[in-house]
Amino acid sequence: MMACVTSVAAAGRSDPRARPIGVFDSGVGGLTVLHELLVALPHEDFLYLGDTGRFPYGERSAQELTRFAVEIAEELLRRRVKLLVVACNSATAAALPALARRMMQTTLGVDVLGVVRPEALRAVAATRTGRIGLLATPTTVASGAYEEAVRTVDPHVTLHPVACPTLAPIIQAGGQFDARAVATVREACAPLRDARVDTVILGCTHYPLIQPMLQRMLGPAVTLVSSGAALARQVEHALSTRALSNPRTGDGELGEGEYRFLCTGDVEAFRELGTRFLQMPLGEVERVQLAAAEAIA
Ligand code: DGL
């Protein structure tokens, strides 16, 4: 377990403000989002669940991802989280509305935030030409969630989506970029260059890890938008408007929250990969068995 727990104990877990924020993803990719949350909200506690046993999510159906998301959310609710963050683009795109409805029916009535809307808002604010690119998994592209989010903010903006079926697994596989990996990234960038987009949404949690390569291939004038920072601001807003911000005073180390990890696959593999994605020390990782969810309406 990381950091100091003194003020949590003092505030008491019965105080809803002292509960952790639940964050989940298909695996370790969401740690790039958690990284931003830890930086922006150092006084909060976080409980992260990586569904590594079922990674990848990127080509699964909306129905399957909704079931997975509900199973994970119910596990996190059992552990008394005060807010749920879906730090996975595929799960957000395919399952967020159904998951949010389901969570509002629980006795705790926990709010659910996803990565699509904050990223879309940022991209629309950043574009000068009205041409935005999207790099994402096939499930995310097929959902049309980014098109809808962009259209809601500005119907005059055009989104150019590119589905990348192998990119997340390639990034996850390791640090060495062989010729095949570089060719895959180049191939993903080509249609965006042709479309002369000036802003590109990194619509998958893994892509911030190859941001320098993407920037080089797309050109320095293109603005890259990733979900972490935009989402962190939305989480901050949600907590303060619901009077759920952790009451830690923030004086030096005592103001730091704790963060813990759950995963559905191999704990050692999570620890090894996780450090690279989180770019911070990883503490306690616990293997968890999820209970099957009832059929989702
Ligand atoms: N977290 C997933 C996403 O953002 C990574 C890719 C996958 O699981 O296929 O879509």
Image: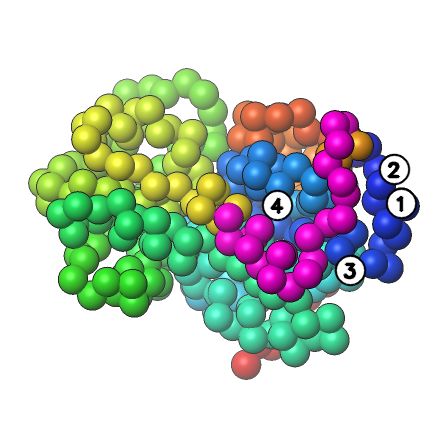
In the image, residue 169 sits, relative to residue 150, either above or below, namely above
Question: Quadrant location of the N terminus?
Answer: top right
Which residue extends farthest bottom?
Answer: 297
Between the residue at mark 4 and the residue at mark 2, the CA separation in whole angstroms equals 27 Å
Which numbered circle lies on residue 6?
2
Q: What x and y, as percent, mark residue 232? A: 52, 46
The answer to whether one can see residue 173 in this image is yes
The label shown at residue 50 is: 4
- Residue under label 3, please give it: 16
Helix or strand or loop: what does disc 3 sit on?
helix
Label 1 and label 3: CA atoms lie apart by 13 Å
> Marks 1 and 4, Cα distance to the nearest angstrom?
26 Å
Element under label 4?
Answer: strand
Q: Which residue is mark 1?
A: 9
**Of label 3 and label 4, which has the lower sequence position?**
3
Q: Within 8 Å of ligand 1, the CB of disc 2?
A: no
Amino acid type, mark 4: Gly
Do the residues under discs 1 and 2 have CB atoms within 8 angstroms?
yes
The question of residue 250 being in magenta is answered with yes
Estimate the x, y position of residue 297 in percent, counting from the top left: 54, 81
Q: Looking at the rendering, which quadrant does residue 240 occupy? A: bottom right
Of badges 3 and 4, the one in the foreground is 3
Image: magenta residue range: 233-253
From what the image shows, is residue 195 above or below residue 216?
Answer: below
